[in-house]
Image (cartoon, grey):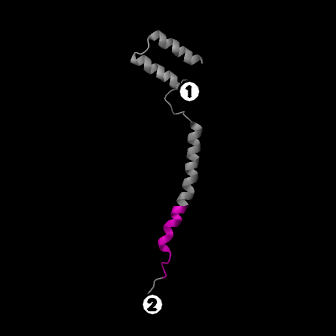
Amino acid sequence: MWMDYEGYGMGWHWLGWLSMAFFWLIPILLVLAVVKYLMGDRRSNAPDGERKSPALTVLEERYARGEINREEYLQKREDLKRG
């Protein structure tokens, strides 16, 4: 009988590598997700304490388009900063 038993199972060695890669990949991804969650929105261009609210952004866009005049813009901006 002509059979080669010497290499039995050698074709499946990649499964061990694959399972080991998943074993380390999952904890690494979890750590990265936690770090990203804890960092929050700190990567914005504005310095700390100077982040714009979405309402202020809309107000600035309206002023830039000419929908409101300067006095109205300044009044609304002060209102938004106070409350």
Residue 71 drawn in magenta: no
- Ranked by sequence position, the earlier of labels 2 and 1 is 2
Left or right: residue 79 compared with residue 60: right
In the rendered image, the residue lying farthest to the front is: 67
78 shown above or below 18: above
Residue type, mark 2 in image: Met
Residue at the (52%, 16%) spot, across then down: 77
Residue at the (46%, 83%) spot, across then down: 4
Q: Position of residue 6 (x, y in %)?
A: 49, 81
| Residues shaded magenta | 5-19
Q: Real-space Cα distance between discs 2 and 1?
A: 78 Å
Q: Residues within 10 Å of mark 2 (few under 14, many from 20)?
A: few
Residue 14 drawn in magenta: yes
In the rendered image, the residue lying farthest to the top is: 71
Q: Position of residue 51 (x, y in %)?
A: 53, 25
Left or right: residue 7 compared with residue 38: left
In the rendered image, the residue lying farthest to the left is: 65
Q: Position of residue 64 (x, y in %)?
A: 41, 18
Query: In the image, which disc is placed on residue 1?
Result: 2
Query: Which quadrant would the C terminus be assigned to in this image?
Result: top right
Residue type, mark 1 in image: Asp
Quadrant housing residue 66: top left
Q: Residues within 10 Å of mark 1 (few under 14, many from 20)?
A: few
Q: Which residue is mark 1?
A: 48
Quadrant housing residue 37: top right
Q: Position of residue 22 (x, y in %)?
A: 54, 58
